Image (cartoon, helix red, strand yellow):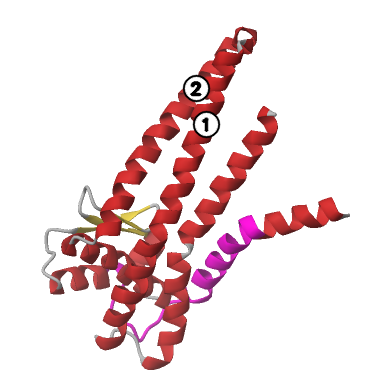
Amino acid sequence: MVVVAGGILLLALIFGPSLWIRSVMARHADPRPDFPGTGGELARHLLDEAGLQAVSVEASDSDHYDPNAKAVRLSRQNYDGASLTAVAVAAHEVGHALQDRDGYGPLGIRTRVVRVAIRADRIAMLATMGLSLLGSAAISPRILLFGAIAVVVSGLIRVAANLITLPVEFDASFNRALPILSSGGYIPPEDQPAARRILRAAAFTYVAGALVSMLNLMRFARLFR
């Protein structure tokens, strides 16, 4: 009974934030006829107002800012949508572009750590594939140890990347996006509490990612034992 309860609690901790984020985003995704433009149009306007004409706004599979390509990328729903979610998420991603412009230190750290995490993921994937191909030849403790270390290090770096992202996300949401939306009159006062919830959900996206990474790492550790 205790084991079952522990398992349920673990699943709630891992998947609860992700479900909450989706729920918040979906709750405010209905079109708003009173909004003058889409998320993509607002992003373009805010960037131009900030003197960032060189930063592009693109439709993508996910919402993010690419500091290497200097591009704000919005999911198709938020790029084309004129909802409170679309507007808030667009402002959040523009917040990252403002961080980049201002030389915000934690953004640079996150960018470097993410690069390392991507490389570590590739090494771990190659190590795992290699062990699978070797089959029985991989019984050597040294080979197994190398593969295990590669996967564990990759997982730890991925968790660290997600955790380092937290201050970057909260700064983009509450020190940049929310003041812009409020003081600029882009949303009415009655929508500001909901916008705050959306921006909080946007910031917590990487908390969910960190928890999932930790779960995958724990699952691997159990399998390796």
Q: Is residue 24 visible?
A: yes
Q: Which residue is depicted at the point 29% across and 84% down? A: 186
Q: Is residue 58 visible?
A: no
The verdict on residue 132 being magenta is no
Which of the 4 image quarters holds residue 142? top right
Residue span colored magenta: 13-40
Q: Decide: few, some or many residues near mark 2? Use Cα within 10 Å; few <14, some 14-19, many ≥20.
A: many
Quick check: marks 2 and 1 in contact, CB under 8 Å? yes
Residue at 81 percent across and 57 percent down: it is 5
Q: Secondary structure at mark 1?
A: helix
- Residue 30 locus on image (x, y percent): 47, 76
Q: Amino acid at mark 1?
A: Val
Q: Which mark identifies residue 151?
A: 1
Density class for disc 1 (Cα within 10 Å; few <14, some 14-19, many ≥20) is: many
Location of residue 224 with respect to 189 vertically, above or below:
above
In the image: residue 141, left or right of residue 204 = right
Q: Amino acid at mark 2?
A: Ala
Disc 2 to disc 1, how far (Cα)?
8 Å
Q: Which residue is mark 2?
A: 127
- Residue 10 horizontal side relative to residue 170, left or right: right
